[in-house]
Image (tube, rainbow, N blue to C red):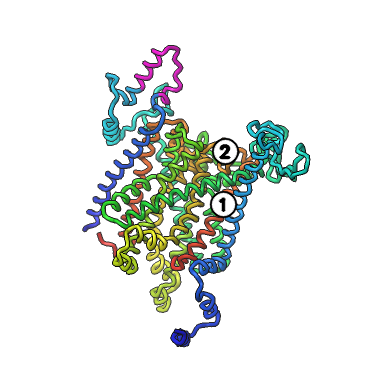
Amino acid sequence: MATIENIETDEFILDEKTLREIETMKGAGQWSIVWRRIKKDKMGMLGLYIVIFLILMAFASWILLQFDTWLTKPEVGLLWGNPDNPASLNNLYIELWIPGLNKANPVVLFNHPTYQFADQVKLPPSFMHPFGTDANGQDMLSRVFFGATNSLALGFIGQMTTVVIGTVLGSIAGFYGGIIDDILQRVIELLYSMPQFILMIFIIVLFEDIKVPGGKYAVVVIFFALIGWGGTALIIRSNFFSLKEQDFVEAERALGASDLRIIFKHILPNSLAPLIIIVTLGIAGTIFLFAALAFFGFGDATIVSWGDDLNKWQDQLLEYPWMPMFPALFIFFTVLGFNLFGDSLRDALDPRLKD
Amino acid sequence: MSLRGYIIRRVIYIVPIMLGVTLMNFTLINISPGDPVIIRIGLIHCETEDCYNAAYNREAISMGLLDSDLYTVPWFKRYVDFVSDLLRLDFGTSWYYTKAGTGRPITQIIQEHAKYTIILNVVSFLMSLLLATAIGVVSSTRQNSFWDRSLTIAMLLGYAMPLFWLAKLIMLVSYYLFDFTGVAEGDAFTEPILLNGQFYKYLILPTLALTIGGLVFMARLVRSQLLEILRQDYITTAKAKGLDSRAVIYKHAFRNGLLPIVTIIGSSLPGLLGGSVMIERVFGWPGLGTIFLNGALFRDYPLMMATNTIFPFLFLIARLLTDITYVFIDPRIKY
């Protein structure tokens, strides 16, 4: 083996850099090659850092809020106060209670996102409130920090459900073809003849009275999943069409493998790259869509999220620019981060698509 | 098959899709919770139950939910009625837009407002197409130059910026620079609008916002397409035989790059239309998007039904036009 390789590399005149690259790639798995390609792309790494920062922020804020609520519960009793009563003393702030310290003076981290301080209304950014406070007397930094949980989780859940539905339907249509495929294509054509934004508004208005656990955003996510799977299904379908004609699938079928085994063991793993790209780039689009819906008043004003804060303070832009500016800035960075990382991931997974 | 046959076939193909779309909207309205009659008469305050029942029956009959003998009309009959009204361009009367107590005919409302949407969209679409071409050509012919890098970064930033927020920022900047927010008001829409100087003044900012929205999307596309084509052998040949670079780009590269660009623009038209709704709302532009959003906020079912029939129709027409332009761009395509 080694001699053949040597002869081949002797025939082509390769510069030292390419040779070294071939040397490092030898024996490396697909994912380590992809990772190496992403690491070379500065913009992609910037996107990755933004995405990691936002995900950490969402998790940190979620854990902190849960922890604070738990500490304040009467049965736990580590902090005084009642979590159901917003005016209760220990609900004003997010605190850390260090064992051994006085219960009445825990370490205050910052304002609780839903508590309104009547004496801290419309303050411009300062040392105490780096992002200023809004017209309700809530700290914008706290709103933005705790809004990350809902904003990112909604985008992630919404995109994952569409991708799962799209993958299942696209696999069935692509594998069996025929009339199932025809019906699926007509349905997608129907769904995609409406601008998604307009269709979503139409549905939200019609179904806003429906009672489901999880409030208004549950309705938004459910219907987003029901109408948004078309793009994924089309890509997975065409992937199945090209893969099922390949020799390795034929060989597996000749060995007597069942349809399910061929789909799950052979074709789906080969469709993983487009799926990862759809999820990464799609999350950006979904977060943008949900923010747009909230911005135009079709969100849920009772929960803490960037889109809803933006909706609340959009008219204050000329007078108090810090109120809407920071939620908008975070939506912008989220979309930017996922787009940059997604582009770089696409180039790394499929270098043929690179421009 | 001839081009004319192809066009006729495509026009006929719109019919089943429109039937499907209206059926989908109709079903959604029917399965949604809440009685539309109660939503409709929510403003009526009746002292007695008789008064309320009379009002309920009157409204239900006028909405076509009950027939004149107070029997429930089956849904398929209502759908057939809706479609036959649609064919006569009769969308019924609006609940939100009223004149002297009775709802105005929706066809009339749409006729008045459609031209604003069309003017705004056509102007900004053409402008973004031109600018996207210019930017794409500049960045692909001078790849990795200062101009290319800064334009690419600007496009990336613009792509990540939510369109509605971009519109707000444009408003803010314009307010500080010119003390003019661009929110449409007053004498901007006195007829005839095409001779009205005020109209053009209020057209500037929405057009700018919508142009940037389309531009960031298209410029990336044009750049990557042109870059791919400039690497092809026939470009090298064209350069080698001594053609000047302008002829190479516009005659050889650009015409071949157009086809994939037109495809993607055609499939992204719903997104552009959705963007137009956002821009119209932010600037209070009285087009179809504002009509639709007002109808949605006040749960005006007939109006929503009408706009949700018109938007897909406009989109299907636009896609038909893109498909026809293929034939002119690519002589290899024969129908």
Q: Position of residue A317 (x, y in %)?
A: 62, 41
Q: Is residue B207 visible?
A: no
| Distance from the alpha carbon under mark 1 to that under mark 2 | 19 Å
User: Mark 1 or mark 2: which is in front?
Assistant: 2
Q: Position of residue B52 (x, y in %)?
A: 40, 16
Q: Is residue B115 above or below residue B299?
A: below
Task: Mark 1 or mark 2: name the one nearer the start of the chain.
Answer: 2
- The chain that hosts pointer 2 is A
Q: Position of residue A310 (x, y in %)?
A: 58, 41
Q: Amino acid at mark 2?
A: Ile
User: Considering the numbered disc 2 on the image, is that residue within a helix, a strand or a loop?
Assistant: loop
Image quadrant where one finds the C terminus of chain B: bottom left
Which label is found at residue A334? 1
Circle 2 packing at 10 Å, graded few (<14), some (14-19), many (20+), is: some
What secondary structure predominates along the stretch shown in magenta?
helix
Residue under the image location 41 percent in, 24 percent down: B38
Q: Is residue B179 magenta?
A: no
Return the residue nearer the eye: A22 or B318.
A22
- The chain that hosts pointer 1 is A
The residue singled out by tag 2 in the image is A303
User: Considering the numbered disc 1 on the image, is that residue within a helix, a strand or a loop?
Assistant: helix
- Figure quadrant of residue B292: top left
Q: Position of residue A203 (x, y in %)?
A: 42, 38
Which label is found at residue B166? none
Q: Is residue B54 magenta?
A: yes
Q: Is residue A51 visible?
A: yes
Which range is magenta? B38-59
Return the residue nearer the eye: A290 or A319.
A290
Q: Amino acid at mark 1?
A: Thr
